């Protein structure tokens, strides 16, 4: 994400193709965030950045040591601060100010967020306080992506000092190379060891120790592949081998961009390390002057994007999250909105590059006190630049005010939706125990006697039951049949929201639902339900609100539930997210592939009824809950739709 930058060296070499590598990496990250269902492995652009940073920084430091006989560590720190801090401080303070004024739903822990980012330890704060990098719905933070900048900041802070010590201890660089390479492998092994399931995702994804292998591979490469000592001429066989390695590694990397999910256990048990190793090979081939890979990655577009990749990465999350908070019909035009967000990101990063990053990279900050005095004495001498001072002061003031006044924990939200969800979650444990007991009793009763198909006609409803029939718009047959059904409901916060209404009509319902739940978390829940004997023959699934899903993910869930159970999958109403259509298509296709899966078309029923939802236009309000429950009961009790021919 950052250019290495260096003190002027007598013999140095600018590798233009690295801008192309940065472009590929930043495109992967941006597309993943904008259209995650299109590029599920786009998050892997970050390890590519790490490899490039590790290689460039180490190579330049080694060049400095060879040419000057020493490494000026203080000068290195000054260059890094000038390169990185202006844009980072601007982004953090501007985002904090915007949240303070306009996005109060994110107004929490601003003091900790600002301070940990400026100290480059934000990734460790994220482990204990932040949300999952892959949680795309539940209050996504505009700061989440800054975890990677903290890891790079820690590398910049310690590596020059460590390198000086190592170069003093070892005249031969081979021991250093093998030590660095060994630490890289240990870091990857440590990631796999710590990752024991989805609960550990934050720890291994954000941890410096578990992600350092990518930077260390780049560091190791610098010891055996110094940019200024590589031969510009090679024999044909060596050229073919070099170019072939570059093309093959690039091809596999692109395939993994499309296929390696961040929720897969394989990703953390060697998959990400393998991807990073291939990235190192690609970096090596681009760095070699005899390879055509540098030319392949060099053009005006790549140069433009690559030089602004730091800003693009930096400003992406705030722009996307603030844009999507204002445009509530993202799902109606996902590609158009993605393009609009991309344009805004490119504009912001270009302005940052032209007027902030590039001018301040070589600025002498020793002049600053004098300039401040001169400004207050004669502001007109500063021309148009004086008009930027007051907004900068105001933004800083608002951000600092927000940092001082924001709560350290999310304040209780007493909205009707939150109250309903919290109430339903509290009731879940006791209600599930009762439902499971009734399900077992119902199973024994069903085995002992087979009811006549018209038995519901003889049932006499109480006044309360008649009121329920009327409230939910059901027929007597539907209510009586639903009352005796044994159902297991698996879902996210939408299922939590509607669970009270569902239990009113289907009292033998065991609800396994949680706020923020995504489909990749379902297999663990299904295993737990099976172990408890709580997975009924009729299973209702409501997943897809919080993230996109792939065919393989939905297939896994269906296979785990089993072919002998009836599955009713409720599709999504989530117009505020661009994956709505993709998720609903995936569910519909699964219903066509599997004879035991029935689509419950909640999206089709509710799409023109905004009055059925709370202000987020995702979670049903009391009116929506009644309509949701009616649709579900109709599907469960309709003999024509509940059995596929």
Image (spheres, rainbow, N blue to C red):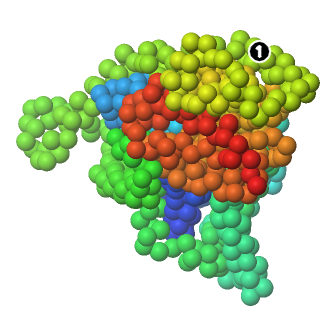
Decide if residue 609 is on the left or right side of residue 290.
Answer: left
Which secondary structure, mark 1?
Answer: helix
* 68 vs 312, nearest the viewer: 312
* 105 vs 238, nearest the viewer: 105
Quarter of the figure with residue 202: top right
Decide if residue 644 is on the left or right side of residue 387.
Answer: right
Residue appearing at x 42%, y 29% in the figure: 614
- Vertical placement of residue 183 versus 425, above or below: below
Whether residue 357 appears in this view of the structure is yes
- Vertical placement of residue 80 versus 477, above or below: below
Residue appearing at x 47%, y 68% in the figure: 302
- Counting from the top left corner in percent of width and height, residue 422 is at 56, 16
Residue appearing at x 74%, y 47% in the figure: 643
- Category of crowding for the residue at label 1, using alpha-carbon neighbours closer than 10 angstroms: few (below 14), some (14–19), many (at least 20): some
- Counting from the top left corner in percent of width and height, residue 174 is at 81, 55
- Vertical placement of residue 490 versus 43, above or below: above
Q: Residue furthest bottom?
A: 236
If the image is split into quadrants, where does the C terminus sit?
bottom right
What is the count of numbered marks?
1
Q: Residue furthest right?
A: 448
Quarter of the figure with residue 400: top left
For label 1, the residue is 433
Quarter of the figure with residue 481: top right
Decide if residue 52 is on the left or right side of residue 184.
Answer: left
Whether residue 163 appears in this view of the structure is no
* 568 vs 76, nearest the viewer: 568
Residue appearing at x 40%, y 44% in the figure: 608
* 226 vs 408, nearest the viewer: 408
- Counting from the top left corner in percent of width and height, residue 43 is at 60, 50
């Amino acid at each position: 994400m950052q250019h290495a930058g260096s003190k002027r060296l007598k013999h140095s070499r600018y590798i233009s193709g690295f801008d192309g590598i940065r472009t590929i990496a930043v495109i992967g990250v941006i597309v993943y965030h904008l259209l995650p269902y299109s590029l599920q492995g786009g998050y892997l652009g970050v390890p590519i950045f790490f490899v490039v940073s590790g290689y460039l920084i180490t190579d330049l430091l080694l060049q400095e040591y060879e040419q000057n006989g020493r490494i000026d560590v203080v000068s290195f720190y000054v260059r890094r601060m000038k390169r990185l801090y202006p844009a980072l401080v601007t982004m953090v303070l501007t985002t904090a100010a915007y949240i303070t004024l306009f996005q109060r739903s994110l107004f929490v822990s601003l003091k900790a967020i600002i301070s940990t980012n400026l100290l480059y330890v934000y990734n460790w704060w994220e482990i204990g306080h932040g949300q999952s990098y892959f949680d795309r719905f539940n209050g996504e933070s505009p700061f989440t992506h800054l975890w990677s900048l903290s890891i790079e900041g820690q590398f910049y802070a310690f590596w020059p000092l460590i390198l000086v010590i190592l170069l003093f201890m070892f005249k031969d660089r081979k021991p250093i190379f093998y030590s660095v390479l060994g630490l890289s492998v240990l870091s990857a092994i440590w990631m796999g060891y710590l990752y024991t399931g989805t609960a550990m995702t934050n720890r291994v994804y954000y941890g410096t120790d578990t992600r350092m292998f990518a930077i260390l591979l780049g560091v190791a490469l610098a010891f055996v592949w110094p940019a200024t000592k590589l031969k510009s001429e090679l024999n044909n066989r060596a050229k073919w081998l070099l170019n072939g390695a570059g093309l093959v590694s690039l091809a596999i990397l692109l395939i993994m961009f499309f296929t390696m999910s961040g929720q897969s256990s394989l990703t953390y048990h060697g998959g990400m390390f393998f991807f990073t190793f291939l990235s190192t090979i690609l970096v090596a081939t681009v760095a070699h002057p005899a390879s055509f890979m540098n030319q392949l990655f060099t053009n005006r577009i790549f140069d433009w994007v690559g030089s602004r990749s730091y800003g693009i990465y930096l400003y992406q999350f705030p722009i996307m999250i603030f844009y999507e908070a204002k445009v509530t019909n993202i799902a109606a035009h996902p590609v158009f909105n993605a393009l609009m967000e991309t344009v805004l990101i490119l504009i912001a990063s270009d302005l940052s590059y032209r007027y902030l990053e590039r001018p301040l990279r070589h600025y002498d900050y020793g002049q600053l006190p004098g300039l401040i005095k001169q400004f207050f004495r004669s502001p007109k001498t500063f021309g148009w630049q004086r008009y930027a001072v007051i907004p900068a002061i105001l933004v800083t003031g608002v951000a600092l005010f927000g940092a001082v006044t924001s709560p350290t924990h999310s304040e209780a939200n007493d909205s009707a939706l939150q109250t309903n969800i919290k109430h339903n979650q509290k009731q879940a444990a006791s209600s599930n125990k009762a439902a499971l007991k009734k399900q077992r009793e119902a199973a024994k009763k069903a085995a002992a006697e087979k009811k006549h198909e018209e038995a519901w006609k003889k049932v006499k409803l109480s006044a309360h039951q008649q009121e329920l029939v009327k409230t939910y718009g059901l027929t007597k047959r539907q209510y009586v049949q639903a009352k005796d059904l044994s159902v297991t409901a698996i879902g996210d916060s939408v299922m939590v929201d509607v669970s009270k209404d569902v239990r009113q009509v289907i009292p033998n319902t065991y609800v396994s639902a949680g706020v923020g739940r995504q489909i990749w978390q379902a297999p663990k829940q299904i295993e737990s339900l099976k172990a408890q004997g709580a997975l009924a023959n009729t299973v209702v699934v409501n997943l897809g609100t919080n993230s996109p899903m792939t065919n393989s993910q939905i297939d896994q869930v269906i296979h785990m539930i089993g072919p002998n159970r009836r599955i009713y999958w409720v599709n999504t109403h989530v117009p505020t997210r661009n994956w709505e259509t993709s998720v609903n298509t995936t569910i519909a296709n699964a219903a066509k592939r599997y004879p035991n899966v029935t689509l419950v078309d909640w999206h089709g029923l509710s799409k023109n009824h905004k009055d059925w939802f709370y202000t987020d236009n995702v979670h049903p309000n009391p009116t929506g809950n009644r309509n949701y429950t009616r649709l579900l009961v109709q599907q469960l009790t309709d003999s024509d739709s509940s059995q596929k021919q």
